[in-house]
Amino acid sequence: MKTAAFEYARPASLAEACGLLAAHGPDAKLIAGGQSLVPMMAMRLARPAWLIDIARLTELQRISAPEVLPVEKDGVFVVGAGVRQSVMERDPRSLADLPLLARALRWVGHVQTRNRGTIGGSVVHGDTSAEIALVACVLNATLELHDTSGATEISAREFYLAPMITAIAPEQCLTEIRFPLWAAAGRHVMRGCSFEEVSVRHGDFALVSACAQVMLDADGLCLRAELGVGGAAPVPLALPEVGAQLAGLPLSDKVIADAADAAIDLIDPEDDLHATAEYRRHLVRVLVAKVLRAAKEDAIQGSIPRKKAG
């Protein structure tokens, strides 16, 4: 099928883009990578009267990381909404300081889609199975939204309302995602992370995904943990309650199994054409346990490059 007719604009600045959004409201759609919007337009699931191309706005393409990892206070890794997924996947700062996002990106579509798709586009699209959105929720990232009146902020955990429905207003543009970098709690602290998913074929939408990031002390006790699941709830779902129950404990098989059981109690998946609710619950239990074990091993082996603070 072909798209319905539309008007096209390529603003030269963020201010101009926001002005166009304000002028055309719900009849306008932003496009940067187009990996989700264009197929929807081709199938007539989306029929914008105006397409506003922000792919070349340099204001949306910055990557900013601290020179050193923070001590005692969380730092911030800033990713512009227009940064290509393939750029972020290979960026040395991302690999060193934001490894959970780098690992999640390996699961996003295929190389061709990551070459065009943007970090912000995936975040705003609001798919419950989206890997980048899940990482943003798990790490409790802050999203910055712009319109003609200025900038507002919202937590990623509050941004997703229902499948494909987010808190962004028609006149707003996502400009950047700010990912917290965990502060070091002292010397001999180990950090690790893991991301896993199950899909019918690699590159397909995940039936269920899970990820975890942990901080361990020298004795292997969990100082901090965050985890979440995608595809098993109407929105990408962080599970801070489960992470809190791991604090102060060794990540033993029993503790990890209990955490996986706790995750099951916090989801309520539904049957659909791709999987039953019961199968998704089974996958949540398996994948939560798997990512926690892998994050623990990743921390112990020290496989995440880290800079020394100071």
Image (cartoon, rainbow, N blue to C red):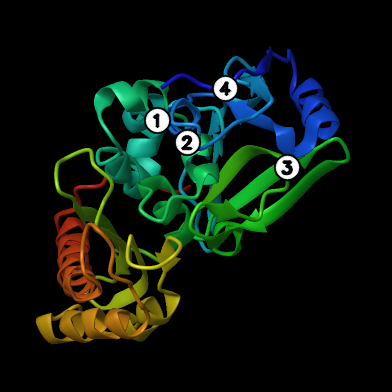
Q: Position of residue 255 (x, y in %)?
A: 19, 85
Instruction: Tell me the residue that label 1 is attached to.
Output: 85
What residue is shown at x 77% (from left), y 31% (from top)? 21
Q: Relative to 210, is 243 on the left or the right?
A: right
Q: Earlier in the sequence, mark 3 or mark 4?
A: 4
What residue is shown at x 25% (from left), y 47% (from top)? 304
Q: Which of marks 1 and 2 is nearer the N terminus?
A: 1
What residue is shown at x 41% (from left), y 46% (from top)? 132
Q: Position of residue 248 (x, y in %)?
A: 32, 84
From the image, which quarter does the N terminus lie in? top left
Q: Name the kind of residue labelled 2 in the image.
A: Ile
Q: For label 3, count other residues whose C-alpha is less than 10 Å away and answer few (under 14), some (14-19) or many (20+).
A: some
Find out whether the residues at labels 1 and 2 contact each other: C-beta distance under 8 Å. yes
Find out whether the residues at labels 3 and 2 contact each other: C-beta distance under 8 Å. no
The image's mark for residue 299 is: none
Instruction: Examine the image and state in which quarter residue 266 appears.
Output: bottom left
Q: Earlier in the sequence, mark 2 or mark 4?
A: 4
Q: Which of marks 3 and 2 is nearer the N terminus?
A: 2
Instruction: Tell me the residue that label 4 is attached to.
Output: 4
Instruction: Tell me the residue that label 3 is attached to.
Output: 170
